[in-house]
Image (tube, grey):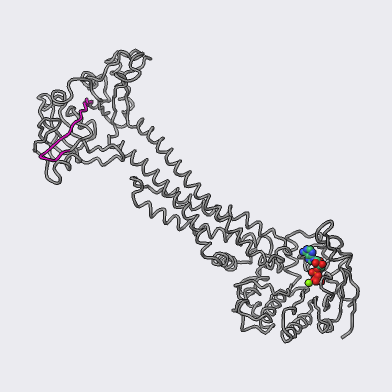
Amino acid sequence: MSQGSPLVVKVDGVTKVYGQGETAVHALRGVSLEIAQGEFVAIMGASGSGKTTLMNILGCLDIPTAGDYWIRNLNVAELDEEQLSVVRSQLIGFVFQSFNLIPRTSAAQNVELPLAYQGVSLSERRKRAIKALESVGLGDRSRHEPQELSGGQQQRVAIARALVTNPAMVLADEPTGALDTQSTKEILELLHKINETGSTVIVITHEEEVARAARRMIRLRDGQVVEDTTWVA
Amino acid sequence: MGGLGLREVWRFASRGITANRMRSSLTVLGVLIGVSSVIVLTAVGNGSALAVKQGIEKLGTNSILVMSSGGGGRFSRGANSNAKGLTLADAKALNDPIKAPDVKTAAPILNASGTCTYGNLSSTPQNITGTWASYFEASNSPIDKGYYWSNDDVVAGRPVVIIGTTVATDLFGTDSPLNQVIRCHGQSVTVVGVMKSKGSTGGFQDADSIVIAPITFVQRSMSGYGSLSQIQVEATSASTTTAAMDEVTAIMSAQHKIKAGANADYRVLNQASILASSTTSSHTLTVLLAAIAAISLLVGGIGITNIMLVSVTERTREIGIRKAIGAPKSAILTQFLIEAMLLSLLGGISGVALGVGISHFTVLGVKPVVSLTSVLLAFIVSALVGLIFGGWPANRAASLRPIEALRYE
Ligand SMILES: Nc1ncnc2c1ncn2[C@@H]1O[C@H](COP(=O)(O)OP(=O)(O)O)[C@@H](O)[C@H]1O
Ligand SMILES: [Mg+2]
């Protein structure tokens, strides 16, 4: 672990149970983690091992059934709905496997949106959105709507939308799962670029190649951490 | 939400509305029908109230009417068994400058019925009225062509008449009726004047369908010498009308020997009392029509709720994405509310336009009178309908948990 850097994520004994009684599914069974500012972490594990569940909790989209989660120094359990939206807006950038761009809305407008929710002025967010799109190599596609872009391009727009706010951490849930090898390479390069600017990057992946590119790999099995390896690049 | 800006809010709302134009149009149509019916129906209510009021005002502002309330009625045996009809003596007694200083004139009215003919044309006036020359003053009846017959004609019982415009048109078309001899109730009479049109009072009463002759002539050759139909009294001014009514009542009670506290066999009415009863009934009509219209606006509102629920459901995933990238609850709420209000205001504005447009035509025989209040009210209510009926779906959208919204397919 990168001792010295302040912690951005601290998870302590987190469990998540879906449903109740007979049909209850224990997706996480006591996960504890510490991730420092600036780390690049790959989360691996078989399908159904609880990776997405953990990621949703880290992204403040879902709440744990038990256990504690601190983001920076904030105990997430103590935040109300309004404060959670501020955390999501200021500290987190999310990249989904299915891109999740807003339909019938141009690339630039999609990228502007997180800034709009932060209250950034129109001209300022225009500027920053264009810059973010340029940094993912889509400066010439800003007026295109999602349905006019390829999968790889859509995912790059989604990455631009995640990095435009300079979040403390970017969470990517199988960002290359729906992409060809060429696009996968481009997306991974982008995630590294983001990491180099100081943001923590946490990426869920099935591919060993992706995991090797990271400096730390956490493996889940049946809702528990079974391996946590850090290696020097 | 402050930084979200009008542009983004507008884009969200218009994207929602244009996503399914047909569905949005039908929703707008619902509000449109509601708003325009509020405007048209209240305008019809107002219009008919105004028509009644104007009809009554044409009687003259100082008019007082004395009518018989006994003789021949169901209740005539009993307290009023001695009921007397109105007589010429009553009319004479009311023209008393000492006992009735506030009465300008009082004229007897004796109505007969019958058909008038000229050549092979005929007209059946609503009334053939026998009266005194002072009637013309007492009843606010200006003349358009020719001249009034005089008290000399009354004394002599001459067959001279003044006719209303309806009778004039029926018998003479556009020709001049003056000095022509027509036959009314089988009697030859000479037309000496045509009254100015009073206009229809709306509905069943046509004030222009009238023939006015000296009372002596009507008694002798048409109705006989029975009681009068009414006595038309005019007060000296609008402000003395109440005093004049008291004087008329006093004189009539003396004439008919009515003891204080006993039931009178006559009634004294004036415009104010007639107006009062007619305004209450037309007010009831307006309220009734407004209630019908309000119900249709409510139905339009339910349409908004419905389409907004659909809009929220269709965009559940989008709401999830927005929340995941930091949208606060208030931003989602505002966006859906604006969308709902946009729909209802579209309906409101076009409904006002349509309603005002329709009100230029005669509806159900009434010339509608649009009131600014009803326009403003309909408009504001349509905005509120958007707010209230869109509020529940919008709040549902804003309260969605991000993870549940994202999982929605
Ligand atoms: N919303 C849900 N309701 C019920 N069970 C769920 C839900 N989401 C995930 N699960 C279950 O939780 C377990 C972990 O799922 P998930 O975190 O998606 O795994 P992974 O992303 O590693 O494939 C699985 O058994 C899955 O079926
Ligand atoms: Mg998963």
Give the side of residue B188 with respect to residue A75, left or right: left
Ligand 1 quarter of the rendering: bottom right
Was residue A172 drawn as part of the magenta stretch in this picture?
no
B290 or B238: nearer the viewer: B290
Find residue B29 and report its horizontal and vertical position in percent: 48, 57
Picture quadrant where residue B203 is located: top left
Give whichever of B392, B253 is nearer the camera: B392
Residue B234 spot, x, y in % from top left:
26, 29
State the count of labels: 0
The answer to whether A144 is drawn above or below residue B127 in the figure is: below
Q: At x 15% / y 35%, what residue is drawn?
A: B116
Q: Position of residue A188 (x, y in %)?
A: 76, 83
Placement of A46 over or under B72, stated as above or below: below
Asked whether the viewer can see residue A58, the reply is no
Choose top left, top right, bottom left or bottom right for residue A130. bottom right
Residue A71, by quadrant, is bottom right
Which image quarter holds the C terminus of chain B? Answer: bottom right
Residue B114 magenta: yes
Going by the image, does B53 lie left or right of B210? right
Is A47 left, or right, of B397 in this rendering? Answer: right
Dominant SS of magenta comes to strand
Location of residue B377 with respect to B202 vertically, above or below:
below
Q: Which part of the image, by quadrant, shows the N terminus of chain B?
A: bottom right
Q: What residue is rendered at 63% in x and 61% in y?
A: B312
Residue placed farthest to the front in the image? A22
The picture places residue A95, in percent across and down from the top left corner, at 73, 74
Query: Relative to B166, is B378 on the left or the right?
Result: right
Which segment is the magenta one? B106-122
Mark yes or no: residue A151 visible.
yes
